[in-house]
Image: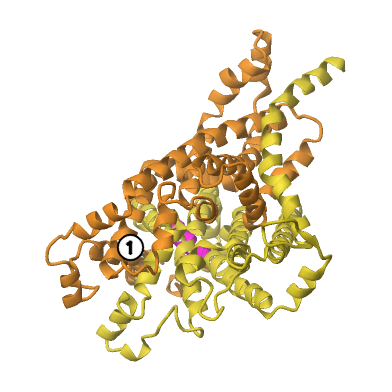
Amino acid sequence: MTAVVQPVTKTPGTAAPDAAKHRNPVRWLVLAALLVLLLLLVGPLLVIAVNAVKSPADYAANGPLSFPGSLYWDGIVDFWNRVNFGRKLWNSFIISLVVAVLGVVLSILNAYALGIGRVKGRVWFLVFFLVANLLPQEVLVYPLYYISKEAGLYDSLFAIIIIFTVIQSAFGTYLLTSVYTEFPRELLDAASVDGAGKWRTLWRVVVPVSGPTLAVLFTFFFIWTWNEFFLPLVFLISNDNQTVPVALGVLQGDRMMDATTTSASALIGILPAILFFLIFQRTLTRGIAAGAIK
Amino acid sequence: MAGRSSRERGYALYLIPGVLASLAVIVVPLVMTVYVSFTKWTGVGDPRWVGFDNYTRLFGDTLFWQSFGNIGLLVFAMAVIPTLLGLVLAAVLFDYVGKRFGDRWAGLFRSGYYLPQVIPVAVTGIIWSWILHPGYGALNRILEAVGLGGLARNWLGDPDYALYSVMLVMIWFQIGYPVVMFMSGLSRIDPSLYEAADLDGATWWQRFRKITVYMIRPEFYVVLITTTIAALKIFGQVFVLTKGGPSNATLVPSYFAYKNFFEKAQVGYGSAISTVLTVLIVVLAFLFLRLQHRSEELR
């Protein structure tokens, strides 16, 4: 990267033609370095994709780096059927969707009271949500495991949905409160002049106006919950309840996982993530920026 | 005044669901874990109070120190390296590629670098344990293909290399996050600042240090805090890649606690480990926040 340290003196007239001559090789050197890095970062995913559609015989003969002689889908289909992957996708989808919706609603309610209502002790509530955000899940896991067993909720989607709703809303409350603290007072006053109560003002004024931020929160919650591993690993132990990351994670090192099956399993774990990335790309880049401002 | 306070009371109602849910899912479990850390408990029957026994045992346990030493190296791989590398990459993409090749190129690189971040942690573990596999892994095959077969290793199975392999995987995983953050910070900077610097004859490096780095300090702190905390909490990749092995070479506190909870049924000891980890994270986070505050006041 040090190749970039190149005088970019722009004294008009004198330096310009000279710089143009010098600039070209540097220009391509920088581009080449960035491309090599891109290849290093994306390459592993490409290797996985190539081997996921390779027959075991082709793999045995030509190794992991050759292109498949012909597209071979049986590895993926067999793996899909053997672990009942459709079911895992559905579990992950339902959990992530419900958590994202409930998490946003809970964040809205908390932030309405703290950011707009400025209830007493709001600083302490905010400190609490900040700390809750920091807690490692290990410090909550055993009591949650014990309580949910006592309550008969162990190994159910319901328990994991409640837990993640609360965990995600801790972040949501923190972020949304800082947004609502700056909420235009004129809009609130106008609503109260029109005779709208707090409940109506919340859903008719506050929520629509903060729509873009809520979309960002929804996207974050959905993707974060989809990618979660630790708590689902502990809580969802039966085959019918597992999520995608848990199902794939616990199969690592299993005897049925030969080279091509493993890459097939990794590929079908990657694909939904890339799909979400493409769908949510714009919200995500905007959201990461919003997270920095808080 | 009376009107205002009744208005406040009205708002407090909206906190009830959040407070009840947080009590059940966060406060009660947190208090229970701290309590259990002072007891001996297998998870069945009643916990037996043992005072500070778990903690004295912890501080004399070489595994505990090893797991915290490992996490130190992982902070380096997940926070320090990606932040520094991301800073340079973001500046080059924004200031050089964006201006000379167009924003489309800069955006393309940014998305490509960010891609590993969107893949579930457990799946990144699967990808890399496949690539680093001593028998059929792609890395050893590549080394053999280019005549460097002598460098082939059992990357995750050899205690001398396992932690470094995990560190490399984590750099691969993290690098995109600071790039995206810093680029969004850079887009706030007034272009006239750069023009003024150009007129003064500043070199690229001077502009990088004096303008770029200075202006995106808020993002810099956020990235450093969030990546450091993520490193302290790491579990998924270690679980899938190495299960803390070989011979505890990649043991981390979260996995150490998990093993005590669910494999050894030493719930009291596991609780002590997670309590120490929690205190460490909270203290570090508040130190960071104070540092950030102070640097903003200096401005």
Q: Is residue B204 at least partly visible in the picture?
A: no
Q: Chain letter for orange, please.
A: A
Which residue matches tag 1? A45
Magenta part of the chain: B85-96
Q: Report x, y in % for residue A250.
A: 43, 61
The magenta stretch spans residue B91: yes
Looking at the picture, tell me which residue is in the foreground, A36 or A14.
Answer: A36
The one nearer the camera, A40 or B69, is B69
Instruction: Answer with the quarter of the image where residue A246 lies.
Output: bottom left
Which residue reaches farthest left?
A: A70
Q: Amino acid at mark 1?
A: Leu
Whether residue B24 appears in this view of the structure is yes
Residue at 68% from the left image edge and 9% from the top image edge: A193
Give the chain of mark 1.
A
Chain letter matching colour yellow? B
Q: Was residue A153 drawn as part of the magenta stretch in this picture?
A: no
Could you tell me residue A15's position as x and y percent?
Answer: 41, 67
